[in-house]
């Protein structure tokens, strides 16, 4: 026995206005949910792309400055050689050997990206210099490096050790007391 379907295939189902509104509301909710999920996906994808770029940049920085610790360990030896040369009294084979060793060591460090800062006669810059002394002088403008006590170095594009320097300062002009100034008038 066959059960008859009250709605035949060719017959259209009559819908009420409330049913249509309900159907539209469901479609709208699905569309909003889809848009929300798409927005979450796009944000997550952008965040992941930013993460990949940040990791790549961190990796490049790590490789770029990988020898920094080695160079910082070698610099005291360079300092000692420079001090030995400052205290020389006569030129002999030992002094010439120290000079050649220092030149070769600095040339080797330069190959790996280390540069010695030029400081004498330059304007004092706290990004590159540490002022260890201030000397009053009229021979130079104020804020000029007069003496370098320890060399500063730049590795690649980063200051790894600022130079220790002595900076110039103009002497204060003696003020004439008010009473003396009036008497002279």
Image (cartoon, rainbow, N blue to C red):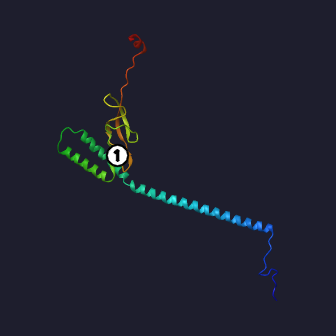
Residue 164 in which image quadrant: top left
Residue 39: percent from the left, percent from the top?
A: 61, 61
Toward the top, the furthest residue is 183
- Pick the residue in front: 132 or 21: 21
| Residue named by callout 1 | 153
Q: Looking at the rendering, in which quadrant would you find the C terminus?
A: top left
Q: Looking at the rendering, in which quadrant would you find the N terminus?
A: bottom right
Residue at screen point 22% across, 39% down: 88
Q: How many marks?
A: 1
- Pick the residue in front: 145 or 24: 24
Looking at the image, is 31 positioned above or below residue 168?
A: below
- Pick the residue in front: 25 or 46: 25
Toward the left, the furthest residue is 92
| Label 1 environment density (alpha carbons within 10 Å; few <14, some 14–19, many ≥20) | many
Residue 171 in which image quadrant: top left
Looking at the image, is 90 positioned above or below residue 55?
A: above
Residue 101: percent from the left, percent from the top?
A: 24, 49
Residue 160: percent from the left, percent from the top?
A: 38, 47
**In this rendering, position of residue 70 left or right of residue 42:** left
Q: Dot 1: what SS?
A: strand
Toward the bottom, the furthest residue is 1
Residue 106: percent from the left, percent from the top?
A: 28, 49
Residue at screen point 79% across, 81% down: 8
**In this rendering, position of residue 37 left or right of residue 156:** right
């Amino acid at each position: 026995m066959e059960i008859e379907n009250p709605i035949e295939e060719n017959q259209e189902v009559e819908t009420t206005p409330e049913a249509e509104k309900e159907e539209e509301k469901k479609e709208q909710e699905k569309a909003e949910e889809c848009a929300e999920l798409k927005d979450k996906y796009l944000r997550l994808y952008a965040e992941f792309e930013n993460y990949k770029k940040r990791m790549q940049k961190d990796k490049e920085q790590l490789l770029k400055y990988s020898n920094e610790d080695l160079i910082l360990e070698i610099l005291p030896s360079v300092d000692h050689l420079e001090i030995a040369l400052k205290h020389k009294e006569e030129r002999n084979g030992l002094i010439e050997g120290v000079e050649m060793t220092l030149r070769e060591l600095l040339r080797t460090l330069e190959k790996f990206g280390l540069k010695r800062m030029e400081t004498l006669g330059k304007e004092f810059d706290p990004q590159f210099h540490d002022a260890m002394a201030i000397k009053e002088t009229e021979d130079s403008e104020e804020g000029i490096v007069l003496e370098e006590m320890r060399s500063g170095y730049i590795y690649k594009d980063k200051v790894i050790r600022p130079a220790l320097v002595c900076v110039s300062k103009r002497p204060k002009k003696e003020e004439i007391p008010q009473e003396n100034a009036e008497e002279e008038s």
